[in-house]
Amino acid sequence: MEQQFNVLVSDDISEKGIELLEQEPGIHVDVKTKLTREELYAIIANYDGLVTRSMTTVDQELLDHTSGRLRVVGRAGVGLDNVDVEAASKKGIVVLNTPTGNTLAATEHTMAMLLAACRMIPKAHNTLVGGKWDRKSFMGFELYKRKLGVIGLGRIGSQVARRARGFEMDVYAYDPYILKDKAEALGVKLLGSLDELLRTVDVITLHTPRTPETLGMIGKRELELLPDGAIVVNVARGGLINEKDLHDALKSGKLRAAAVDVFDKEPATDNILLGLDNVIVTPHLGANTDASQINVAVMVAQQVINVLKDRDYEGA
Ligand code: NAD
Ligand code: MLT
């Protein structure tokens, strides 16, 4: 008789991924989102596989409740900062993600946020919807021939750079882990230090993972290195920029604007940045397109099946 595996889907993912799991013989799927931590602790020992996105934190405490049955954790996304990969590995649990599944969604959201910040679109929209025809207050910032600094020239950073070149921006990057040739092939000038990049560009956009090295990489000192009136975009991870320092630089007028999709603490409904006039925010929507959500759900489902069925898989 075929072995039976139970998989828990604990965050919202596309139906296409759930269907793939359900169609696989020997796999039983439970979709239980918005569980409290206690509810999750109470049931996790019944599962061989766990599929998450951003809302389920897979930490030591959760792993301590697995009773040795859990074999695989799959995250339908790129960042693994909500999974304690080391603790999971110590228990022999395979951790998977979908590094390529939402690259274009995050890239396009970055461009949307940048353009919306440059032209103050949310504020102009609210003004007109509020019954005021005001053209004078909304003088935009043109990207043509402006200098963009990409911090982290990986998958998303590279795609952002290509699109920025399409706007005829001069694109610079800081990424200590890539070769100069890669940047050159993209028409990007790779600079040797973050400080040099900050002194050079008009706009920065962050595309690094959240690691001990990148946490707080942009604070008061770094923001001061930017020219007056610079723009900051973060569609990567909360915590890369010190939010209080960003708030102060926006409030003082040092920065013209910021566009922020990700926050130190999410959900971020009472975040310090929300009260400012020159910041635009979205609730971690970088990966939210139909195409990307199908991609990541199908990719993660297939990988989880592969692990449970002892087939080849790509670990995180
Ligand atoms: P990637 O791994 O392809 O690229 C990351 C790049 O950052 C790499 O080239 C790496 O060398 C570079 N890097 C690492 N440490 C650095 C440092 N200290 N300074 C400068 N560069 C450094 O990852 P990706 O797919 O491009 O994703 C980038 C980020 O975007 C991740 O944090 C990911 O979680 C986030 N993301 C967010 C959303 C969203 O919904 N907002 C969606 C997708 C991805
Ligand atoms: C990611 O890291 O891929 C994103 O944050 C995914 C998400 O939307 O949760």
Image (cartoon, rainbow, N blue to C red):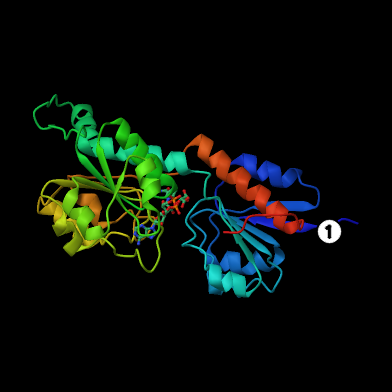
Q: Which residue is label 1 attached to? A: 3
Q: Is residue 14 left or right of residue 285?
A: right
- In the displayed orientation, state which residue is furthest to the front: 181
Marks counted in the figure total 1
**Viewer-nearest residue: 84 or 285:** 84
Q: Is residue 31 left or right of residue 99?
A: right
Residue 88 visible in the shown view = yes
Quadrant where the C terminus is found in the figure: bottom right
Q: Position of residue 64 (x, y in %)?
A: 60, 75
- What residue is shown at x 63% (from left), y 55% (from top)? 314
Q: Position of residue 85 (x, y in %)?
A: 54, 67
Could you classify mark 1 by the number of other residues whose Cα lies within 10 Å: few (under 14), some (14-19), or many (20 or more)?
few
- What residue is shown at x 17% (from left), y 26% (from top)? 131
- What residue is shown at x 71% (from left), y 65% (from top)? 46
**Viewer-nearest residue: 177 or 17:** 177
Quadrant where the N terminus is found in the figure: bottom right
Res. 246 image quadrant: bottom left
Above/below status of 270 relative to 144: below
**Viewer-nearest residue: 57 or 91:** 91
